[in-house]
Image: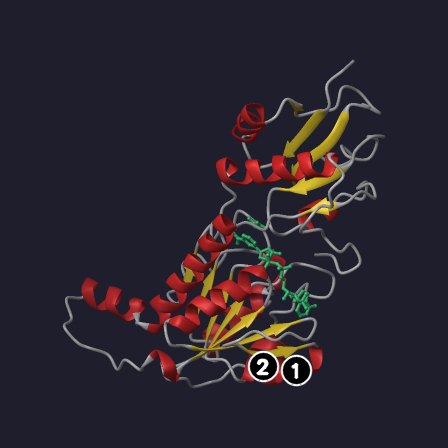
Amino acid sequence: MTKDKILVSVTGWEPSVWLDQFRTLTDRETVTEPDGPNDPSIRFAVVWKQRPGVLSKLPNLRAIFSIGAGVDHIFKDSGVPNVPIVRVVADDLTMRMSEYVVWQVLDHFRQGRIYRDQQNRKIWREPYQPAASDLVIGIMGLGVLGTDAGLKLGTLGFKVIGWSRTEKKVDGIACYHGEEQLPSFVGACDMLVVLLPLTPATHGIINAKLLGHMKKSTPIGGSVLINAGRGLLQVEADILAALNSGSLMAASLDVFQTEPLPRDSALWNHPRVTVTPHAAATSDPARLAPIMVRQMDEYDAGLPLANLVDRDAGY
Ligand code: NDP
Ligand code: OXD
């Protein structure tokens, strides 16, 4: 009898970093390709931008695990079978994202750009510094990551508001929801932090129209955009136009329409843009593989899977 297998299809990753973890955690065989079409022994797939079609003919596939919190990478492949899809919800990932958000918010709030420029020019001057409670930080996407980041910003004294698809109640965060409330939500923010998933409904949502709702003047001078959700949420030409017209003061972008960010993108050298290479919250195999194996074991024992993706909503 052949052993049950885990298929690992992770474009952009060195597969061995995942395979090595699974091999220490489970007796299931771990492979990077099925043993021919219709391989009956593959029970679970662990994926990041899986090879297109690789999942389509696996008769005994029980569930797909995304190694990221986002699952848009899975749906780029039209051959995804109708089995449960589990996404990452893990304290480690959440903490990393909250660190990124707090880091960027504090850098803009505490005038990091101005101080770096002053130091380069040996200028000793203290710019006006408002209090955290003077600023409204808006979290666009009040899910697992957005809620944690928002609550942590709240403990630092910022006023925090959030926007989601469905109505929510979160202590300490004033909640908005739905398309209708989007303009008033954006209009109330001094900094906008985007932690939305990429779905047909959110594709290109950070565009000239949305940026046009942002405040022209804020306690730190102007509005700030921070996007660590997905690059295709944003229209980069519109962000550059808003930065250049002054209607957006600064931006921190971790994700881009095309990744890696093309060398000729004007975002690289823009003096008011901070670029990080889709690194806000990395998926650490040593921390995430044990969670996946536990879920596989529980599912095989008849327990339900947690953190399932709603295919209709796309996240
Ligand atoms: P969740 O699914 O927990 O939260 C998503 C949030 O977005 C929810 O509040 C949801 O609303 C809201 N949302 C979805 N669609 C819409 C819509 N059409 N209108 C308004 N709100 C909407 O996801 P996570 O918080 O775990 O992750 C968010 C995203 O962060 C991931 O999808 C991924 O793209 C990105 N990410 C980026 C990383 C990086 O390193 N840059 C690392 C990890 C994740 P509702 O609450 O009503 O469902
Ligand atoms: C994710 C990511 O979705 O790393 O987790 O982008």
Q: Residue at x 37, y 82 (%)?
A: 133
Q: Which residue is mark 2?
A: 185
Residue 104, quarter of the rendered image = bottom left
In what element is the residue under mark 1?
helix
Asked whether 287 or 249 is in front, the reply is 287
Q: Quadrant of the C terminus?
A: bottom right
Asked whether 281 or 52 is in front, the reply is 281
Q: Is residue 108 above or below residue 60?
A: below
Label 1 close to label 2 by CB (< 8 Å) = yes
Q: Residue at x 82, y 30 (%)?
A: 60
Q: Is residue 312 above or below residue 240?
A: above
Asked whether 39 or 174 is in front, the reply is 174
* Label 1 CB sits under 8 Å from any ligand 1 atom: no
* Label 2 CB sits under 8 Å from any ligand 1 atom: no
Decide if residue 153 is on the left or right side of residue 313. left
Q: Residue at x 74, y 46 (%)?
A: 304
In what element is the residue under mark 2?
helix
Q: Quadrant of the N terminus?
A: top right
Q: Which residue is mark 1?
A: 181
Q: Amino acid at mark 1?
A: Gln
Q: Is residue 76 visible?
A: no
Q: Amino acid at mark 2?
A: Phe
Decide if residue 238 is on the left or right side of residue 59. left
Provide residue 230's location: percent of width, then percent of height. 59, 57
Provide residue 246's location: percent of width, then percent of height. 45, 79
Q: Residue at x 72, y 40 (%)?
A: 64
Q: Is residue 138 visible?
A: yes
Asked whether 101 or 174 is in front, the reply is 174
